[in-house]
Image: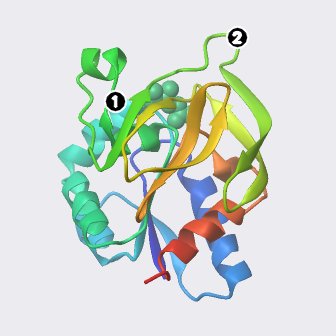
Amino acid sequence: MNIAVIAAQGAVKEHIDAANRALRRLDISGSAFATIKKEEVARSDAIILPGGESTTISKLIHRSSVAEEIKRAAGEGKPVIGTCAGAILLAKHGDEQTEKTQTRLLGLMDITIKRNAFGRQKESFQIPLHIRHIGTFDAVFIRSPAITGTGERVEVLATLDEHVVAARQDNLLALSFHPELTDDTRIHEYFIRMGLEK
Ligand code: GLN
């Protein structure tokens, strides 16, 4: 399985390391690689959209036409995960901040996202989260968004306070937090297994 980690900006290397470790643990051949080239994204079997700054990432993926390839791959049923800023980009509906910054969302998941939802005092924190299908996971939140609305086809995987912070819609996964910043590879393993489900 070849996993494209969209290297526009943000936690790219950490995702590559986590995905490679997860592949080894599952004994699946293949590797994760950084790319911002649409041809390489088209050839991949799964896509990781890392965190960073969603407005910047959005500009870079649209400029390079990678955005179109991500949409095509998602439509073909390939697994796509968006973490933090990546989750913002997967959403169909944004908030006043995405509007003000004219951030173009990919609109793939029927979720509403609120940027920087956890307030100034709580800009970054780590908390054990109960995640459906995975168990308790030490989740790192960094100026994270929250999922404030979910459509019918969306499965809620985790909540924190009144917010949804992990959700799945078919082959698409949105996480408010950064699973690549801990040694725990269970989320990457779950994501990789999504690619083997059919
Ligand atoms: N606050 C960032 C945004 O809204 C996301 C932060 C992150 O990806 N760690 O784009």
Relative to 62, 137 lies left or right: right
Residue at the (63%, 54%) spot, across then down:
14
- Above or below for 38 versus 93: below
Q: Nearer the viewer, residue 1 or 112?
A: 112
Question: Which quadrant of the view contains residue 94?
Answer: top left
The picture places residue 81, in percent across and down from the top left corner, at 47, 56
Give the Cα distance between marks 2 and 1.
23 Å
Residue at the (43%, 84%) spot, across then down:
198
Disc 1 residue type (three-letter): Thr
The tag earlier along the polypeptide, 2 or 1, is 1
The picture places residue 96, in percent across and down from the top left corner, at 32, 15
The picture places residue 90, in percent across and down from the top left corner, at 36, 46
Question: Which quadrant of the view contains residue 127?
Answer: top right
Label 1 Cα neighbours within 10 Å, binned few <14 / some 14-19 / many ≥20: some
- Above or below for 177 versus 45: above
Q: Nearer the viewer, residue 156 or 128?
A: 156
- Above or below for 190 versus 13: below
- Above or below for 162 versus 196: above
Instruction: Note whether ligand 1 is within 8 Å of mark 1.
Output: yes
Residue that carries the numbered disc 1 in the rendered image:
55
Disc 2 residue type (three-letter): Gln
Question: Which quadrant of the view contains residue 120?
Answer: top right
Q: Secondary structure at mark 2?
A: loop
Q: Visible in this render: residue 48?
A: no
**Type of colouring:** rainbow
Relative to 149, 10 lies left or right: right
Label 2 Cα neighbours within 10 Å, binned few <14 / some 14-19 / many ≥20: few
Residue at the (40%, 77%) spot, across then down:
45
Relative to 104, 46 lies left or right: right
**Mark 2 in CB contact with mark 1 (< 8 angstroms):** no
The picture places residue 180, in percent across and down from the top left corner, at 65, 52
Residue that carries the numbered disc 2 in the rendered image:
121
